Image: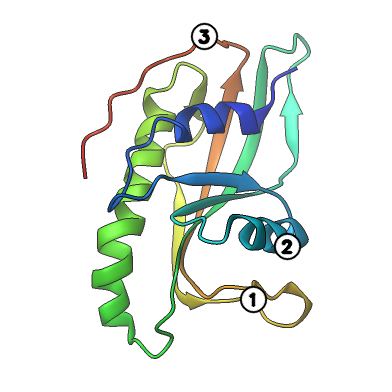
Amino acid sequence: MIVLEDAIQGIVDQLPEIDGFPINFHWGGQDELNRYIALKKMPYPLIWGIPQKETIDRDGKFLNTNAVFFLATRENQTDRLNDVRLNESFKKVLFPLLENLRYGFLKSNRINFTRDDDEFLKLPNFSESGENKTIDYWDAIEYRCSLRVSDNCEKQILKFRKI
């Protein structure tokens, strides 16, 4: 059985650190997110996968999904304006993280894009409210892409540019 999260973890494990911090990947709903943040204390930069419907072909060789990820940094200074956030969080951490994740998907022997375009949304000073509240404030990017994952389990070494 093809496991999407294993294929993504194989790429994330090779992503270069950003500002001396390793990249963390996990996935799930809101409760899982808050437990993960509490357990890991400072799991940033973070790539958080949101569960989506997956389809698998009859032969079990390919899995397809419209993937949704949140790429996040923790933001302690909630009074910052967006121009400061753009320079400090997005340009220094989140945009390079997004570029490297997309590069990993593009160069992977297991994951392919099924569309020519992806979507992303910048979310400065982001926190859900009410029952869906995250326990940290984020500067984040919501990233959406359509992926096809093969059953090729061969370990591939990717070469990322140093940031």
Q: Nearer the viewer, residue 18 or 133?
A: 18
The structure residue drawn at horizontal position 48% and vertical position 13%, both measured from the top left corner, is 155
Q: Which residue is mark 3?
A: 154
Snapshot quadrant of residue 128: bottom right
Q: Which residue is mark 2?
A: 30
Q: Position of residue 109 (x, y in %)?
A: 45, 16
Q: Is residue 85 above or below residue 81?
A: above
Q: Is residue 4 above or below residue 150?
A: below
> Which residue in the rendered view is the most extreme toward the bottom?
79
Q: Nearer the viewer, residue 119 or 75?
A: 75
- Displayed quadrant of residue 40: bottom right
* Mark pair 2, 1: CA separation: 9 Å
Q: Which mark is residue 128?
A: 1
In this picture, is 118 found above or below 79?
above
Does the residue at mark 1 contact the one at mark 3 (Cβ under 8 Å)? no
Residue 156 image point, x, y percent: 42, 15
Which residue corresponds to the image point at 37% horizontal and 17% vertical from the top-left? 157
Q: Amino acid at mark 1?
A: Glu
Q: Amino acid at mark 3?
A: Glu
Quarter containing the C terminus: top left
Identify the mark nearer the N-term, 1 or 3.
Answer: 1
Answer left or right for 112 relative to 131: left
Question: Which corner quadrant holds the N terminus?
Answer: top right
Residue at point 73%, 34% (across, down): 54
Q: Give the SS element for disc 2.
A: helix
Do the numbered discs 3 and 2 sit on residues whose CB atoms are within 8 Å? no
Residue 151 location (% of width, % of height) = 63, 13
The earlier-in-sequence mark between 2 and 1 is 2
Mark 2 is on which residue type?
Answer: Gln
In the displayed structure image, the side of residue 4 where residue 95 appears, left or right? left
